Amino acid sequence: MSIVQQAAERVAGLACWSGPVEPEPITGGITNVNFAVGDAGQRYFVRVGEDIPVHGVMRFNETAAARAAEAAGVSPAVIYTEPGIIVTRFVEGRTLGPEEVRDEAMLARILPLLKRCHREIPSHLRGPVLIFWVFHVIRDYAASLREGRSRSVGLLPDLLGRAGRLEEAVGPVELVFGHNDLLAANFIDEGERLWLVDWDYAGFNSPLFDLGGLASNNELDAAQERWLLEAYFERPADADLLRRYQAMKCASLLRETLWSMVSEIHSSLDVDYVAYTQENLERFERAFAAFEQGA
């Protein structure tokens, strides 16, 4: 029986349903197995995934973040949880692509949602939650790659050396509650309202990481990046802010590259992680070259 079939059987047996249900697999996830479920005239979204310690994904943290995000009006309502399962209201909307995120009108909608995530979610959090420091993640991924005898071990000394330079350039940070995975697919446009979903990697972090991740994941141009920084911080972007931002943007791309390298040897999902590694490594190299030119 496949992973998806096993997960579907588990979803069908959840205690939250009013009667028999038929989970419909939703493709596209690269960490979890997802389903849409109809029950009593309503539709629900179900995420199935156990803890993934090698990626720092702990479901207690994801659940706490999802509930706080609901309370802050950032994410749809959480209906039911149990270890490895989160059931939320199904958003009848359009999942964004990178080209839509790059649209200036959409960026103007994303920015206040991101600020609400950073500023308002902490007041709704309950219990222990994680911090997400990208440079710790990078070092831990490197250790996992060595232990797993990854094909990419030979790249690590150089990449870790550059990560150290980036961490020094970022310097002291302000802490906010970050989403930390701002792929276009984690934004859903319901028409009048925009939602942010998928809290696997949520945790306290610098706002520069989400800003850099949003830009790098969706390939914003330089003018859009400057607008994003100045609109977020409500002041002109001076040379120091731009330098620290560019360092964090590079770090977000390096983290995504190492995430994929680790997934190559640890994930059982049917995803071409080798191709994803190469794509992100090339993007990191371009960003790092630009960072060095601005030094």
Image: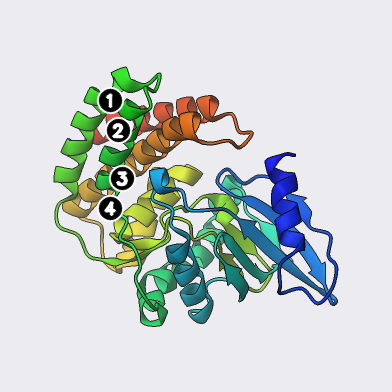
Q: Amino acid at mark 4?
A: Trp
Q: 217 or 267: nearer the eye?
A: 267
Q: Earlier in the sequence, mark 1 or mark 4?
A: 4
Q: Closer to the observer: label 2 or label 4?
A: 2
Q: CA distance from mark 1 to mark 3?
A: 14 Å
Mark 2 burial class by Cα count in 10 Å: few <14, some 14-19, many 20+? many
Question: Which label number is shown at residue 133?
Answer: 4
- Rendered residue at 37%/82% (across/down): 123
Question: Viewed as shown, does residue 4 lie left or right of 193?
Answer: right
- Proximity of marks 1 and 3: CB atoms separated by less than 8 Å: no
- Proximity of marks 3 and 4: CB atoms separated by less than 8 Å: yes
Q: Is residue 243 above or below residue 107?
A: above
Residue 161 visible within the image:
yes
In the picture of the structure, the residue carrying the numbered disc 3 is: 137
- Proximity of marks 1 and 2: CB atoms separated by less than 8 Å: yes
Q: Earlier in the sequence, mark 1 or mark 3?
A: 3
Q: Which element carries disc 1, helix, strand or loop? A: helix
Q: Earlier in the sequence, mark 2 or mark 3?
A: 3
Quarter-wise, where is residue 261 in the image? top left
Question: Which label number is shown at residue 142?
Answer: 2
Q: Which element carries disc 3, helix, strand or loop? A: helix
- Proximity of marks 2 and 4: CB atoms separated by less than 8 Å: no
Mark 3 burial class by Cα count in 10 Å: few <14, some 14-19, many 20+? some
